[in-house]
Image (cartoon, helix red, strand yellow):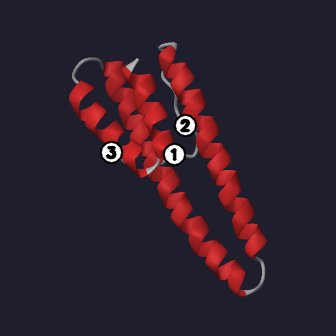
Amino acid sequence: MWAMIMHLTNLVCCVGVVITLILWTQKKAASAFVNDQGKEALNFWISVFIAGIAIGTISTILSAVKLGVVGNLLSGMLMVYFLAMSIIAALKANDGIAFRHPYTLRLIK
């Protein structure tokens, strides 16, 4: 249950990552699965945050040359990916299956 909650709190944006970090630090000693999925949820959030900054920069540059719609499309695709992967990860964690997000930087080991 804690692993599922950590994946779902990512959906609450900046507050969610703080909640995930607090839950992970408090519950990681309780089980190896919770520790693993807490790190996975944090790594995913960090990766999406970095991708968001990159897309925002690209969008700004593209807006200067009248191609802002491409940046908006990329932002929308990142949002849909983030929502879908967070929900899939939460469902897998609830079933006790360790989930690995594709295209995620593993910064917290």
Question: Dot 1 corresponds to which residue?
Answer: 104
Note whether 8 is above or below 80 in the view shown: above
Residue under the point 31% across and 20% down: 32
| Residue 18 visible in image | yes
Contact between labelled residues 1 and 2, with CB atoms less than 8 Å apart: yes
Tell me the SS state at disc 1. loop
Question: Dot 2 corresponds to which residue?
Answer: 101
Note whether 95 is above or below 7 in the view shown: above
Closer to us: 109 or 25: 25
Three-letter amino acid code of the residue under disc 3: Val
Three-letter amino acid code of the residue under disc 2: His
Dot 3, how many residues are within 10 Å of its Cα: few (below 14), some (14-19), or many (20+)? some
Gap in Å between the C-alphas at discs 2 and 1?
A: 6 Å
Closer to us: 17 or 109: 17
Question: Dot 3 corresponds to which residue?
Answer: 18
Placement of the N terminus among the 4 image quadrants? top left
